[in-house]
Amino acid sequence: MALSISRLKIIAKTIDGDYGVDIPFEKGLFILRLDNSHGKSTCINAIAYALGMEKSLGLGSAKLPFPPSLTKAIEDKNGSEHLIIKSSVLLEIENKSGDVSTLSRQIIGSDEENIIHQYDSKIDEINQHSHQKLFLHREGDTTRPLGFFKWLDTFISWNLPLVPNFDGKEIPLYPSTFFPTWFIEQKKGWSSIQSTTPTFLKIKEVKKRALEFILNLDVNDNVKKRAKLKVDIDSALNTWRITYKKSELLAARVLGQIRGVTELPEAKFDQYKVDIAVKNNDKWLSIQDVAETVENELFEFNKKIETISSTLDDNVQDKIDRKELKLREFDGKYTELDTEISFLNQQIYSTEIRISSLIEDQRKYEDLKKVGELNVFGNTKLNDADCPTCGQEYSQNLIDLDSSSSVMSVDESLEFIKQQIKAFKNVSDSYKFQKRTKSVELGSIKSNLNEIRKSLRKLRESVVQPDISLYEENLRYKIKLENDVELYKDTIKSLVELRLELDAIHRKHSSLCKQRRNLPESVLSPEDTKKIKTLETYLRSLLTDYGFSSFKPEKLDISRETYLPTREGFDIGFDTSASDGIRIIWSYLLSLFKLSNEFDTNHPKLVVFDEPRQQEANKFSFTTLLKSASDICNNGGQVILATSEESSVIIESLQGVNFNMFSSEKEDGKIIRKLKIK
């Protein structure tokens, strides 16, 4: 991978003529020396803007990373202002193969917002009639043929990977996410490593993904596999839940309950144990048994009805009495079940309140444990059982406990609360199961009550019109039995299909979980580990060269989780001075560059620092930085440093060092000035 800047040209058109700057760059160490407030950051930001990376400059909602001199009006050497009619930036770049391209992007002017004109030539040789318009910051700019980042990806040979986002999808890694690993702007870029990384694309662990790409780690494949497996597992679980709801609705058709399957798949799932239980004569029976019973009842009734005469049945009143007795019995059961369900609702509510209270207690104890682990009072005498004033011993408890009494520790209390939560959840689940069972039973009783009331009405009518009423009652009962048989048959058929569906989902879920378990615990390959260790070595060496003094550089590590510098697993920013924090950023970004000389990485072998001498880093460290940057470029590449240091000091400090410098002195005025007409 390689990208180098060959030339930068900024043009602002006014009525007074063209204003701007034209800077030729060279490979290796290149120093852009300008006084403060004379256009140094404008030039550096113009490079980012021409590459479509302005969203990585930490500017928030600001659209343009430029001062009014390029967007509104510019002053001439006499102090007169001239309105900007149109302004643009041209950037000449070169890749590893020696291919040269010029990128032209408008700052203000016409309606070509978010369009970059790309020419396959140097700035002086561009043909206005031979170029292509590339779009950016719109959907497809990383994947479509006329997307700018798709073109840049090909030009640098990056091959942007797909990474997971928070919507559960995979999207290309946007170049602006890893731009801060080799480009530091002045205002926010020096606050920490990757401080200006944009997050608007909702990429999961975006800084980590950016470093994995720049280092070209194998870990990205494993991350993608894990992310895809998670999405697939979540999808399988969702399908299972939907199917489980279908099973409950299927059971409700026959006033039954689904058995042998839970809301979430279990390891020992057996499709043949999935069944619908129906209450019959106070017993919960399999739907198969109930269907067989009803079918036999229909068969016997059909045999019986053939022998029934149309004469008055002498036992009609006896039947009415039995039906009324049955009605009272079911009424009593209905009232009893309704009361029990109300009681269960109250118990469920009380249990849930208790669980919520215990969870809140658990959170408080966990916070207390965290505070305890910090050992805030470790160096004080506040934990002693002695009064700090009089020295008299006192009890830590409000109640005077005898020696045999003991108070639970925070860990013991926390474990006790967890056990209580578990116990109350089991109680709640038990109540909910009882409620579901009794609700189904209540529905069955309600149905029976309706049937008995209809039957009673017909029997009472048969006293007045015995022949017709008796015939109607037998016919209605026969139709009911036939409907029940048909309903049970359809339900059993659907149950068989449901078993097959659940079994297929369970097999898929089990297979996905097994694949996830078989993924390596360590996502870093041996080659990845070697890269990280080498990066660690480079970082420590450069920190030593730059005079890092907050602690010994040997105590600094590269995290295998974030790939960032850490000390004993903690952010090193807490242990360093401000100037040493700047040295860490120098060292880390140049180490990433240096690593590309030894390993196959995606680093462009280009580093840009805008005013690297932050926090008054001493001149010795800064000079060492310049020399090491020059040495790193001996094998190819480019380091561009923009600084306001005096040119004489730089030249004197870098005697014998290979570098190139573009300098404009203070008396010459700001760098954006009227261009000479050629």
Image (cartoon, grey):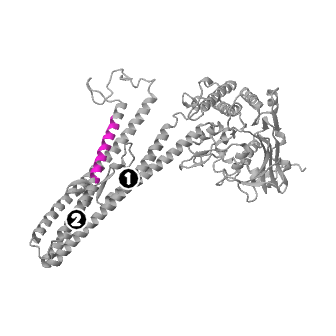
Q: Residue at x 25, y 70 (%)?
A: 479
Location of residue 269 (image quadrant)? top left
What's the amino acid at mark 1? Answer: Arg
Q: Position of residue 532 (x, y in %)?
A: 62, 30
| Numbered label attached to residue 299 | 2
Q: Earlier in the sequence, mark 1 or mark 2?
A: 2
Indicate the quadrant containing the N terminus: top left, top right, bottom left or bottom right.
top right
Q: Position of residue 30 (x, y in %)?
A: 79, 36
| Numbered label attached to residue 499 | 1
Q: Position of residue 419 (x, y in %)?
A: 33, 37
Residue furthest out toward the right: 678
The range drawn in magenta is 416-436
Q: Is residue 79 left or right of residue 247?
A: right
Q: Is residue 579 left or right of residue 438?
A: right
Q: Nearer the viewer, mark 1 or mark 2?
A: 2
Q: Is residue 77 visible?
A: no
Residue furthest out toward the left: 314
What's the amino acid at mark 2? Answer: Phe
Secondary structure of the residue carrying numbered label 1: helix
Q: Specify whether residue 183 is painted magenta.
A: no
Q: Residue at x 43, y 46 (%)?
A: 507
